[in-house]
């Protein structure tokens, strides 16, 4: 998270970068990136609040999205979900298990490898995801 409420001025950035080589200290780029960080942080906070208000987290929503967005498939393995979402394997495991318990996902064992599981959206998960999409996109658009 980015916690600066007030960004530094151009003069402040220039004073902090006096000892940095000319190639490294473009104040306009630095200020632009800082502004981008602040905007992204504010959006993440809004999204956290939005998902919490609907009994979800961003991670749960992202898991639903990556499973749903596969055009030729309706399920993904734990490994495939992990390749699409940047969180640790144990976090994904706990989240998948809690989503099954809450009725958003269902899992099936792989026919060829009994240790492997495939995760798909339940009817409740599909409904929840598609109900939230319009408001989610509206928040992103803001």
Image (tube, rainbow, N blue to C red):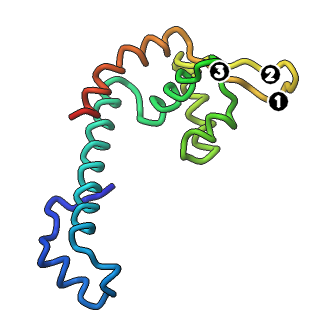
Badge 2 vs badge 1, beta-carbon distance below 8 Å:
yes
Residue 2 lies in quadrant = bottom left
Q: Earlier in the sequence, mark 3 or mark 2?
A: 3
- Which mark lies nearer to you, 2 or 1? 2
Q: Which residue is mark 1?
A: 115
Q: Which mark is residue 75?
A: 3
* Residue under the point 14% across and 73% down: 10
* Residue under the point 53% across and 30% down: 63
Q: Which residue is mark 2?
A: 110
Image x and y of residue 85, in percent: 55, 41
**Mark 1 neighbour density, 10 Å: few (under 14) some (14–19) many (20 or more):** few
Q: Earlier in the sequence, mark 2 or mark 1?
A: 2
- Relative to 141, 72 lies left or right: right
Q: Earlier in the sequence, mark 1 or mark 3?
A: 3
Viewer-proximal residue, 47 or 67?
67
Residue furthest out toward the top: 123
Q: Secondary structure at mark 1?
A: loop
Q: CA distance from mark 1 to mark 3?
A: 16 Å
Image x and y of residue 115, in percent: 82, 29
């Amino acid at each position: 998270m980015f916690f600066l409420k007030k960004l530094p001025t151009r003069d402040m950035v220039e004073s902090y970068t006096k000892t940095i080589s000319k190639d490294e200290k473009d104040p306009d780029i630095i200020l632009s990136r800082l502004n981008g960080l602040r905007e992204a942080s504010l959006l993440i906070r809004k999204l956290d609040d939005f998902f919490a208000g609907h009994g979800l987290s961003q991670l749960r929503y992202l898991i639903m999205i990556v499973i749903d967005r596969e055009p030729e498939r309706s399920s993904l393995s734990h490994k495939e979900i992990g390749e699409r979402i940047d969180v640790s394997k144990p976090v994904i495991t706990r989240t998948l298990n809690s989503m099954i318990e809450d009725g958003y996902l269902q899992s099936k064992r792989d026919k060829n490898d009994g240790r492997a599981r495939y995760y798909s959206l339940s009817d409740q998960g599909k409904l929840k995801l598609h109900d939230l999409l319009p408001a989610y996109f509206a928040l992103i658009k803001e």
